[in-house]
Image (cartoon, rainbow, N blue to C red):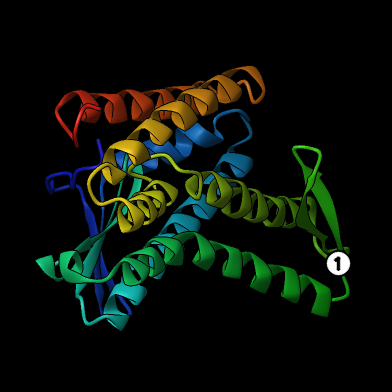
Amino acid sequence: MFQVPPPTRFDLNFSLFGFSVRISPFFWVLAIFLGASSFNLERIAIWVAVIFVSILIHELGHSLMMRRYDIDSFIVLYHFGGLAVPLSARRMSLGWLQQIAISLAGPFAGFFFVGIVIGIVELAGGLVFTNPMFGFLPVPMAYLFSAGDLVNEAIATIVWVNVFWGILNLLPVFPLDGGRVSQQIFMRFDRWNGLRNALWLSVVTGALLAIVGYVYFNSLYMAFMFGLLAVQSYQMIQGGVGPRF
């Protein structure tokens, strides 16, 4: 599922900050699908642009942190989001804290992006406030009085995509960033059973998120995505990861 897709002649290729970036045509299909809840072409265009920029920033976070540890990488955006792919096996030799730093760099790059947008709105004299997500998690929101509805919708979409998806990405579901963090922590304190325990946590968390996505958010995509990740983690366990006791 999270494998590098083969290149096609329809890919968009460019370089950013010294990293090669390849965008599969199916990435645009995903972006349009996620924005298709509205039949307004302008709003769909906003969704596509925000998803593109947000996922690219997320993967740049991973790649920049890998560069910090002298690991070259390239970025692929495809139908399941994005990947920052190391060009050598050097990452496998890094310590657990370095591995966690690389995993956390992606979602925190998105949070930093939101902070910049919120700061620009504040400097421009807009309204900045917090709105509780799930009834308890304060999420920053912003409204720019001098801008039109589409600009403010773009701001709200940037916040939603980077904060909500960033939080989901930090939950312990393998192979998302939170799942990789939990794997490193479990294996740090139990090298024999750690990976297996992390995968069981991924199974339970992924299944719960699939139910929440369908029931609470009415999102078939979220239900499918996390349900598939839960099944994938279970298959890895059944495939003989770690001891069976």
The structure residue drawn at horizontal position 54% and vertical position 30%, both measured from the top left corner, is: 36
| Tally of marks | 1
Amino acid type of the residue tagged 1 in the rendering: Ser
The structure residue drawn at horizontal position 35% and vertical position 75%, both measured from the top left corner, is: 65
Residue 60 vertical placement versus 132 (above, below): below
Q: Is residue 243 left or right of residue 137?
A: left
Q: Secondary structure at mark 1?
A: loop
Q: Is residue 15 left or right of residue 119?
A: left
Q: Position of residue 215 (x, y in %)?
A: 63, 17
Q: Position of residue 133 (x, y in %)?
A: 75, 43
What residue would you read off at disc 1? 146
- Quadrant assignment, res 228: top left
Callout 1: few (<14), some (14-19), or many (20+) C-alpha neighbours within 10 Å? few
Q: Is residue 210 left or right of residue 28?
A: right
- Quadrant assignment, res 92: bottom left
* Residue 54 or residue 236, whichever sits in front: 236
Quadrant location of the C terminus in the rendered image:
top left
Residue 174 vertical placement versus 103 (above, below): above
* Residue 104 or residue 199, whichever sits in front: 199
* Residue 59 or residue 51, whichever sits in front: 59
The structure residue drawn at horizontal position 38% and vertical position 64%, both measured from the top left corner, is: 100
- Quadrant assignment, res 17: bottom left
The structure residue drawn at horizontal position 57% and vertical position 19%, both measured from the top left corner, is: 214
* Residue 197 or residue 112, whichever sits in front: 197
Residue 154 vertical placement versus 14 (above, below): above
